[in-house]
Image (spheres, grey):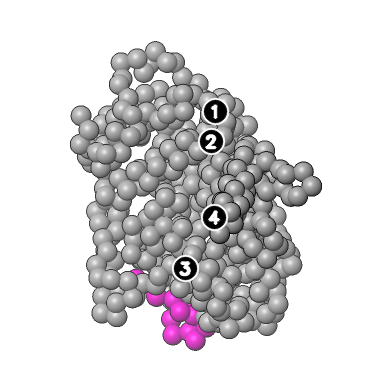
Amino acid sequence: MYLLFGACSSCYLLLFFCFQYDLSIPGVFQLTRGSSITNGLHPLQDQHASLDLTTEQCESTFPGLTKDIQNTVALGPFEIQPSGTDGPLQVRIKDGKILVYQPGRIETLSTELLDAQTATLHQLHRAVITTPTRLPDTIITINVNDQPFGSAFSYTRPAFRPPSSGSHGPSLTRAFLMPHFSFWAWPLPSIGSIGRATAATGMIESQIPFSRKDRRVAWRGTMGWNSAHYPASRENLLRLTEDADWADVQALHGYEIEADGSTAISGKVNSTTTNNALMIEDFCRYKYVLYTEGITYSGRLQFLQMCRSVLISPPIAWLQHSTHLIKPLFSTDILPKPEHDYSREGSDGSKAAWSIHYPPEQANAVFVSPDWSDLEQTVAWLERNPRMAEGIAERQRNLFVGQGYLSPAAEVCYWRALIRGWSEAVRYENSDWDGRRPIAWELFSLGGGGSKVG
């Protein structure tokens, strides 16, 4: 018995070292990290969960992910200077560590912006400490407001100017697009984080095939948040879908807009008395999900893209870090065009930003008229062509979930490419920062966003 126990222990240790150090036993087998003993088992390491992919692995696993970074770098070099007391957050990456320059306005930030800032710095830190190769030393400006400005890491950037603004309106800045803070966490009761939502949507998608989903279009949102690109978008949507049996469209109750633009939430999600919000994964129970932008972007986009549902939206006016992966089918390409009605085609800026029209067999989203006037016709066309509709829905989920473009691996790959791209284009004088003492990220993170760090 002791001999048998000893032999088993020796075999276990041998297998452990073979796996740990990628060793092989000639004539027997080779076992490495990421391999599986039989085809019936999942790999020991899911590549989409890996945080230490090399640059080459990132590019081969997620082709096209960093296209926007490359386009922004191609605009040429730019200069930055230290922020003033009311300026944005700035951080220095040096020798693989993150140092934070104390923002003077930290105590004036809303709770939502403090959460976004903290989550974004956690994302940046995770990407830096897990990189398999050294990242360049640099100084970065980070903007956690919804509105982009100047040269900075930002959540969004306008794809085109509003039709009525001429040369005015939101400037087409060289904002370097960074992943949304929800990739770390978003403390809304209906969301939580990308990780939680991914698991929850996966459960729903495994239980409900597309053909058995609710055939209505689904939307929840606050009123009063409309962009200059589509000034009456939400009001039009509610008006056109009122009492429609093909739509589950409701303005949210129990949400109030504060003076600073933040959202105060009362009640609990799914409470029948205080609000009518849906858990974010429950949108995946519908065949068709609607995306509306707010004053700028809406953070719900990446969550809706996890669904095997048809994403329907006016041409997107505010880009996020993965928006360029959308391949839209335009309603104008599948519906009869009313004579002399050119409003459905969108502005010249919209047409330039979304110049490629994909056929139904290639599309992963549907773009409708900016005023939603052809939404009912579009949904009717999708209902008459269920295989086309399911294909669009399948391609969306397959890209963002199946191919991992919203995965932890893709996120850190993108962050590291973002740091490299920024460092390639940014110019600054080190002497400008000589009089400023940065705070180690580890210490800054203990101050509740920095407000208690002296």
Q: Whole-Å distance between the Cαs marked 1 and 3?
A: 35 Å
The label number, if any, that marks residue 2 in the structure image = 4
Tell me which numbered mark, 2 or 3, is placed earlier along the sequence.
Answer: 2
Q: Whole-Å distance between the Cαs marked 4 and 2?
A: 45 Å
The kind of residue on which mark 3 rests is Ala
The label number, if any, that marks residue 134 in the structure image = 1
The residue located at (33%, 64%) in the rendering is 189
Q: Whole-Å distance between the Cαs marked 1 and 4?
A: 49 Å
The label number, if any, that marks residue 131 in the structure image = 2
**Residue depth check, mark 4 versus mark 2: number of the one nearer the observer:** 4
Query: Percent x, y for residue 171?
Result: 48, 40
The kind of residue on which mark 2 rests is Thr
Q: Is residue 144 something one can see in this rendering?
A: no
**Residue depth check, mark 4 versus mark 3: number of the one nearer the observer:** 4
Identify the secondary structure beneath mark 1.
Answer: loop
Tell me which numbered mark, 1 or 4, is placed earlier along the sequence.
Answer: 4
Magenta-tinted stretch: 241-253
Tell me which numbered mark, 4 or 2, is placed earlier along the sequence.
Answer: 4
Is 264 drawn above or below residue 19 in the view shown?
A: below
Splitting the image into 4 quarters, where does residue 351 fall?
Answer: bottom right
